Amino acid sequence: MKKLILTLIAALGLLVGAHAEETGIPWDKAPNKTNDLAALQNGAKLFVNYCLNCHSAAFMRYNRLQDIGISEQQIKDNLLFTTDKVGETMKANIDARQAKEWFGTVPPDLTLVARSRAGHGGTGADYLYTYLRTFYRDDTKATGWNNLAFPNVAMPNVLWELQGDRRPVYDKVEAHGHEVEVFKGWEQVRPGTMTTLQYDEAVGDLVSYLQWMAEPAQNTRVRVGVWVLLFLVMAVVFTWRLNASYWKDVK
């Protein structure tokens, strides 16, 4: 039995190590802006303009965006495509067969991506925040792009105009008798329409929106949960005092 447990632990360690190698660099900590309506509104705008062309959010309706302060008229004027209606779900117009021909795979639905991508490296938001900030040009790939957080990804960098072109810079270090390359940072090859700080903030807004979209009632649930716990604490105090009052004359 002890041998079996040790074998399972070793196998788990190998799997974790393999996953760490597959996902590349460590994940950066994503900012949490799920209570910031301005950030969520900007994230929704970025999502519709840059993500919804290929990726659907089939479990999210446009009119739910009213929960983050966007009016129905604003949704109709700024976030809907010509044929869509405000009560419909966010579906991409891309043809699945064509997408598979172009990218080698069908772009996944993003409704729950911020929850499904959580792993040993951090939360799903941490992964997305790192992923959207680590694209670089790679002429050996069909799309012309690669990614440090997801090596050999099929997706191109749809935000490249905002970020510009960058290339990763590596240091060569000695490890176990071999020379290996370790990621050091980025070199800006061509500037984008945003500075690095502005781009990171925009990606933070987009990731926060994806977090919110994965569970729109999350903040309400947390607030209700706090009040429920406070109520239970008060109920315990009153019950304890009531019990003491009932039994005070019993010897």
Image (cartoon, helix red, strand yellow):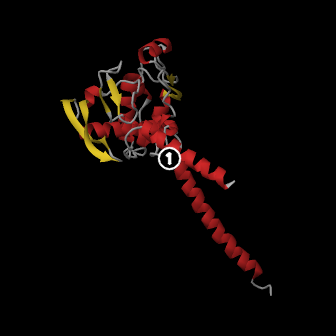
Residue 76, compared with residue 11, is above or below; it is: above
Tell me the residue at 40%/26% (across/down): 51
Secondary structure of residue under mark 1: helix
Q: Looking at this view, is 161 or 241 the one in front?
A: 161
Q: Looking at this view, is 101 or 11 the one in front?
A: 11
Residue 206 point in image, percent of width and height: 38, 35
Q: Looking at this view, is 53 or 29 the one in front?
A: 29
Residue 226 point in image, percent of width and height: 54, 56
User: Does residue 234 appear in the picture of this structure?
Assistant: yes
How many residues crowd mark 1 within 10 Å: few (<14), some (14–19), many (20+)? few
Viewport quadrant of the C terminus: bottom right
The amino acid type of the residue labelled 1 equals Asn
Tell me the residue at 35%/21% (across/down): 141
User: Does residue 157 appear in the picture of this structure?
Assistant: no
Q: Which of the 4 quarters of the picture holds residue 154?
A: top left
Residue of label 1? 219
Which residue in the rendered view is the most extreme toward the bottom? 251
Q: Which of the 4 quarters of the picture holds residue 99?
A: top left
